[in-house]
Image (cartoon, helix red, strand yellow):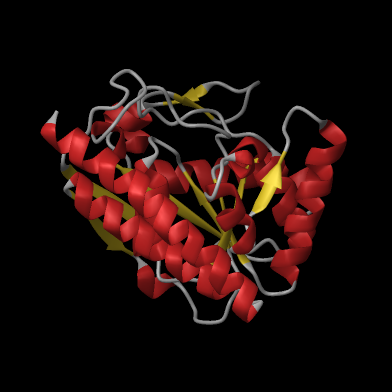
Amino acid sequence: MIRALFFHTVLVNSTFLLGISAILAALLTREPKYAHLAARLWGRVNLWAAGVKVRVKGLANLESGQPYIFLSNHQSAFDILALLGKLPVQFAWLAKEELFSIPVMGRAMSAAGYIPIDRSNRRKAMESLNETAERIQKGTSVVIFPEGTRSPDGVLQPFKKGAFIIAAKAQQQIVPIAISGSYRIVSRQCAGMVHPGVVDVMIETPISTVGLTAKDNETLMRTVRESICRHLTPEEGGLFPVDTNDSCLPVSNCRR
């Protein structure tokens, strides 16, 4: 309880102070990278406040200056802190539109060049997907959670197709990211409670999308799922569907 109180106090204050810093940085420099630096510091500060250590492997798989489509599983809100604080790459998020209406934080997200998506409006959602693909083609890396929302229990959920539509349009490399252990830090079932611990982040080998079209989405989805699943525990992977019409792969495919 004491840890939770400390964490939430730091979270509220750091969100306000670093959010304002990000907005001012973007206004003064017209460069989203400085706002993103504030976001990185926000991630690190709140990981520290929660007593969370992040172990990152696979950074050698990334090439400097290359735009990537990072696709990560989503176990808890700490995935955001872990990727912001420990992924040493300038990137934008594709995030649900509601987050951009939060005072200070929403303005800071816009200042950092993050992209909103309204999943309740098909036309607006497609516009966001097209904008994201264009941004990637122009050199911006983007992080997307293909599950669309946090897993309620840490188990890998079915993927939505939006991220793979973007990949086919952008024709840039996908980098699967497996996050293991963050659901133990905080979960939907224990809202507000924080349990210090370790989160493992594995950056997999990039997957080329050159020449792929929408017809290849199912195969690409399968490849990304298998790549992420290799680095999850059986409890996190379990029996996972390759797509909504296919059977499940066995737990053994999800073991480290």
Position of 105 with respect to 212 (left or right) is left
Q: Between residues 6 and 211, which one lies in front from this camera angle?
A: 6
At x 83%, y 32%, the residue is: 122
**In the rendering, at what x and y percent does residue 49 appear?**
21, 49
Can you see residue 179?
A: no
Can you see residue 228?
A: yes
**In the rendering, at what x and y percent does residue 82 appear?**
35, 53
Q: Relative to 137, does residue 181 appear above or below in the rendering? A: above
Q: Quadrant of the N terminus?
A: top left
Q: Between residues 74 and 188, which one lies in front from this camera angle?
A: 188
| Residue 109 sits in quarter | bottom right
| Residue 92 sits in quarter | bottom right
Position of 174 with respect to 240 (left or right) is right
Looking at this rendering, what residue extends furthest in the right direction? Answer: 123
| Residue 114 sits in quarter | bottom right
Q: Relative to 34, does residue 42 appear above or below in the rendering? A: above
Q: Between residues 157 and 245, which one lies in front from this camera angle?
A: 157
Q: Relative to 104, does residue 61 appear above or below in the rendering? A: below
**In the rendering, at what x and y percent does residue 168 appear?**
75, 55
**In the rendering, at what x and y percent does residue 35 appear?**
53, 68
At x 35%, y 66%, the residue is: 58
Q: Between residues 177 and 244, which one lies in front from this camera angle?
A: 177
At x 36%, y 44%, the residue is: 12
Looking at this rendering, what residue extends furthest in the top direction? Answer: 189
Q: Quadrant of the C terminus?
A: top left
Position of 188 with respect to 256 (left or right) is right
At x 58%, y 34%, the residue is: 148
